[in-house]
Amino acid sequence: MGWAELANSKPDGYTIAGNNIPHIILQPLQRKNAGYQLEDLEPVALFQATPIGLAVLKTSPIRSLKDFVAYAKGNPGAITIAGSGTYTGHHLGHLQFQKLAGIKVTYIPFTGAAPQVAAFLGGHAMAILANSNDLVQHQDKIRILAMGSEKRFAALPEVPTFKELGYQMTCSIDRGVCVPKGTPEERIKILESAFLKIARNREIQRQMVEQGFVPVAMDVAASKKYIADLTVDYTELVKELEGK
Amino acid sequence: MNENFWLAALQIFTPGNLFFLVFGGIAGIVVGCLPGLTATMALALLVPFTFTMPAVTGLIMLGGLYVGAMFGDAIPATLINTPGTPSAIATTFDGYPLAKKGMAQQALITNAVSSLFGGIFGTIALLTLSPPLAEMGLKFGPPEYFWMAIFGLTIIGALASESILKGLTAGALGLLLSTVGISPIAGDVRFTFGAPSLQAGVDLTVALIGLFCIPQVLEMVEEGAKKYRVIQYQSQKGLFLQVVNYLIRKPFLMIRSALIGLIVGIMPGVGGNVAALLSYNEAVRWSKNKAEFGKGTIDGVETANCSVVQGSIIPMLTLGIPGSPAAAVILGALLLHGMRPGPELFTKYGGTTYTFILSFFVAVVVMFILTVLGSRFFAKMISVPLKHLLPLIAFLSIIGSYAIRNSLLDVAMMLLLGILAYFMQKLGLQSGPLVLGLIMGPFAEQGLVQSLLMGQAAGSVLKVMFGRPISLVLIGLSALSIAWPLISAWRKRTILSEAGSQGRLFEEASDAAVETLMVEGEKV
């Protein structure tokens, strides 16, 4: 909704919006009438990455990703995974993993991170695909099976990545800022340097890590490339998955 | 209680903290007073300002605002039949009729007293029982939310004074309205007629203003000065004591409402609007004079909207899961100050946290004093001549509905719903049940779909939907809620038919007497 409004607003450099990847890529892919196209949004900077991880409660009999896959193979559809939304980072992570591991699990969408975490902690779902900050917050109650980052996640160093365990996928939600297409370049430059200054600030970075986020500092060029690469991947993925 | 506890308590009374507590509280009352401005919105606006304050001051201010809004929202609910925030929906059911009877001040005082009680009750629970209560809140999963929504819908029975059929129709309309926009689970778009701006659906506050406020305004215009001669406000001494006396005799009413508010508050994602409606339903069910509800009885004004505040804070502080949208915003403020929910809050940041919790006691008392003192003033406001009052209300409605999402579409929707409600009321379809459908719809839909997914995975949908203890309690309550009006209607008919046959005897006897008299009279 917000991005539709941004796309329709004046490109004067004063109107900016939070940028959320993969959502801005996926929403127009899924819905014909999202109110905007990906090209209508110009990225300015990306400053935060939230890798997504798969976890179960400490009381669960599943002790590792291998256990998880084995159980799922033996009981197709029986494992319930709480996620946030449909066609979001979580949902895609679930679809990717299902395909790569050759298993079938039931994804239960909730309307946000808080409801999904609440349902998982209350035992209503057997597993969860959650954002890194939620995982860090509840780490004493849960067992994290794998993280969707490229390298091991700093705040959870003992948790293997999906890639390490043999599944070629990453799964994360990245946040930044964007402006409507057509915003004059000088204004974008001003915004870019302001946000990058904040993103590179040591203190801010420390706070982000403490809270379970990965600080990132991508400028306009880097952001554009990152989004473009992801778009290619996701478009293919969605086509494949829908064709299934 | 060790000395740290008292130290934390004393912290509330530093000049800075006290100032912001009162400031937040008054801001809350004002926000509560203006339909269209909700507590959540105001909290969101103030959170950035807390950035420069010490954490404890910021939290105290936000807490004060939340509490103030719960006190203030009864004012427009009582005076102009428009809930100041969604938590005051139930207050309109009896508050407005009371105002029409000239008892507006009683209604306002009742709300103040019950909010005071609820607030203290909730804060004690927050202080002492947070961890177990939070765990209990987690036990509510998709099936429980579904059955809670169903239970909420059965309240239509309590609200539909005229005809259950009409109440159900209005409720169904509300459910239909709630589906406009993006479906919560599958993400498909419904009923937007191609307009992207409708994808966000019908906002509840916009609907409230439209459905409750506009029909009254239109009615007042229609009747003109004739019927709506405003009952002149008469200053009465001792009203306060009168109300307090009355309420003290009904401890169960107060305790039950506060308890419901607490429990609903603890449930993640559900806030004051649901709590107030559920406690209204229970108040009706357990009361001895049901017929008075809806026509202006003090019992009806006693709602749970204040203990919800503390209830929603409980899971927020212990687990980081907000119990209501407003609590979510306060969570944001916590995180802003680098404080993370969980055991850390009570140990490392214990001083701040306990001061915050204890400040609720003070906030509730201060708000109580303010609203009781102000009740006389507010009650006088309905004596304002209609020709000034109506345009003012209309103006507030438009500004209020615009303010929510900066959207002219919302204003249009508000007016549309208002006109619709006006005609609906002529047909006997009331706004209360419609709003119920609107609120419960998303909960019911999400709960159902998620539960079906769970059932599919577990191999048995029936077991998931009907096999869980909390669900069974809710199902039982729903069945009771449905059966109760039917049972009491049946009982009423039995009593009436007995009375009727007695009445007939009486009639025959008196006819015979009259005949005798006449015969005698003729003789004479």
Image (cartoon, coloured by chain):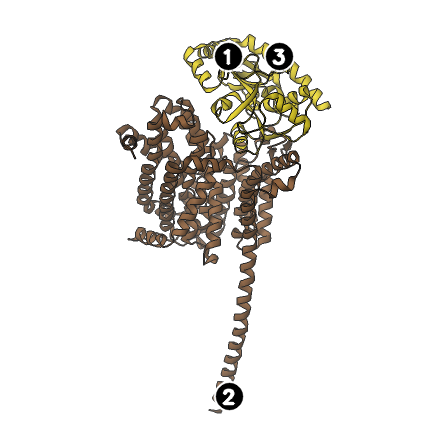
Chain colours: A yellow, B brown
Which residue was labeled with disc 1?
Answer: A216
Task: Tell which of B264 and B158 is nearer to you.
Answer: B264
Q: Amino acid at mark 2?
A: Val
Left or right: A226 in relation to B394: right
At label 2, counting other C-alpha atoms closer than 10 Å, the crowd grade (few under 14, some 14-19, many 20 or more) is few
Location of residue A192 in the rendering, given as x and y in whole percent from the top left corner: 49, 10
Pinpoint the chain carrying mark 1: A
Badge 1 or badge 3: first in the primary sequence: 1
For the point 53% across and 27% down, the residue is A58
Same-chain status of marks 1 and 3: yes
Which residue was labeled with disc 2?
Answer: B519
For the point 47% across and 10% down, the residue is A196
Residue at the outermost bottom position: B523
Which residue was labeled with disc 3?
Answer: A228
Q: CA distance from mark 2 to mark 3?
A: 107 Å
Q: Nearer the viewer, mark 1 or mark 3?
A: 1
